[in-house]
Amino acid sequence: MITRHTTTLLIICCLVISDAAIIKRRSKFDFPTNLIGLNDTAEEWLNPYVMTYDLADFGKDLFDGMAPRHIVDALVNATTSDDPMTNQYTEPSGTPRLREAIAKVFSPLIGQELKGEDNVLITVGATEALRIAIFSHTVPGDEWIVIEPTYIKYIPDIKMAWGVPRLSPLKLVTTHGTISGDDWVIDKEQLESLFNKKTKGIMLNNPLNPLGKVYKLEELEFIAHLAKKYDTIVISDEAHEWMTFKPHIRMASLPGMFERTITIGSASKSFSVSGFRVGWAYGHPNILNHLKVAHLPNVACSPSHSQYAIAYAFEEESRNSSFFATHAQTVKQERDMMVKMLTEAGIIPVVPDGGFCMIGNWSPLRQKLRGINTAMDFIIWMIKNIGVLGWPLEMFYGDEHKYMARDYIRFCFHKNISTLEKGARNFKKFADLL
Ligand SMILES: Cc1ncc(COP(=O)(O)O)c(C=O)c1O
């Protein structure tokens, strides 16, 4: 006989079961575990402020001025060309013309006879090259060593491939005088301690975004030594390679490293055309072929018109080497402007030797700003009171080391002159307010 008590129990059971079913069903719509946390970025947090305030925006790593005229003209020519194929897919690995142009420029720089067909792959930005370099070499549980601070996409890419990032923070070895990227050094012992039989490779970013560190030969030799000793790959992201203010040494040029290095470059950074979406990877066919396999189902090809325009840009560079040298000079002047702005505001700049981003230590201002404790507090205060945007350096660290970055903000300084002048005016407000 069914009592009132049993009926109540039955109802409760049904509710619990149906709740459980809902929870189970909803869980299919949740992020897979390897994606959890990847959308929780400072960029997302800062977006509403960026939309609301009129800022000198030194946050995002893009140039907000006009792209080089000769490259834009080449793009227009490709778009309006009589050749119908300029409006269609290119070969998956990129147009032979662009691959050859890249092979020609980089061969002497790394001391190899690169062939467009065998050694070069054109991708949708360096972003895609990084993604497929990691994806095409990772099985779940493979470990990748990441030097911190790190370009923001490495850790998400490794996690999305079900790999495991192992983190090695650079050590700051000087705290007085002018501080540069050279003062942030590899912790050799800690770095080597991360290598083991699961290590698939190491991510190198040279010049290093966000810091602007340009690695010295001795540091590259140490990384190369570890890669050989533990038989690993090196993914060498050299997206900022043409904006260097001291000699830039390519990892693939070191003895025995071409065979184990995938070098990645970017038209976004090389020619300030981040909307073109052209990047490349070059290396030995044994490793480059993995990337080719992942690239085709990923994106089919990089935008056709952009490839024609970038081929022209590289060919021009081979003919008269004018753009990269002048460009690096311009970026260096912009760097000097940013160093001055930060110094006058009381933020200690870490002077970069390459790239177009720098970090500044804002901790001397902390005691003057009541209630401002974290870098994010400081950034929001700057947005509201000074009209300047930078990003917290902690974005460039994995969770376990974010605390190391709390005193630093990253500023990207390759900007239109009007943005730099606005920044100079706004940074001066520090003097009035503090
Ligand atoms: C170090 C580094 N690598 C890769 C990229 C991605 O570049 P792309 O626009 O070619 O995808 C960037 C862009 O900011 C970068 O700074």
Image (cartoon, grey):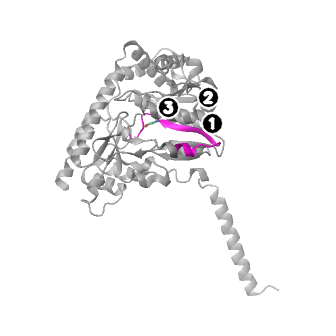
| Kind of element beneath mark 1 | loop
Q: Is residue 333 left or right of residue 242?
A: left
Hey, which residue is sitting farthest left in the picture? 432
Mark 1 Cα within 10 Å, few/some/many (few <14, many 20+)? some
206 drawn magenta: yes
Give the answer, above or below, for where 82 lies relative to 222.
above
Name the mark on residue 137.
1
> Upstream in the sequence, badge 3 or badge 1?
1
Name the mark on residue 287.
2
Q: In terms of image quadrants, where is residue 9?
A: bottom right
Hey, which residue is sitting farthest front in the picture? 189
Give the residue pinned by disc 3: 221
Q: Amino acid at mark 2?
A: Ile
Rendered residue at 51%/31% (across/down) = 124
> Upstream in the sequence, badge 2 or badge 3?
3
Q: Amino acid at mark 1?
A: His
Q: Position of residue 171 (x, y in %)?
A: 42, 46
The answer to whether the residue labelled 1 contacts the one labelled 2, judged by CB atoms less than 8 Å apart, is yes
The answer to whether the residue labelled 2 contacts the one labelled 3, judged by CB atoms less than 8 Å apart, is no
Which image quarter holds the N terminus? bottom right
Which image quarter holds the C terminus? bottom left
Q: Is residue 350 left or right of residue 78?
A: left
Rendered residue at 38%/41% (across/down) = 211
Give the answer, above or below, for where 244 lies relative to 380.
above
Q: Amino acid at mark 3?
A: Glu
Q: Start and end of the magenta stretch?
A: 191-211
Q: CA distance from mark 1 to mark 2?
A: 9 Å
Q: CA distance from mark 2 to mark 3?
A: 21 Å
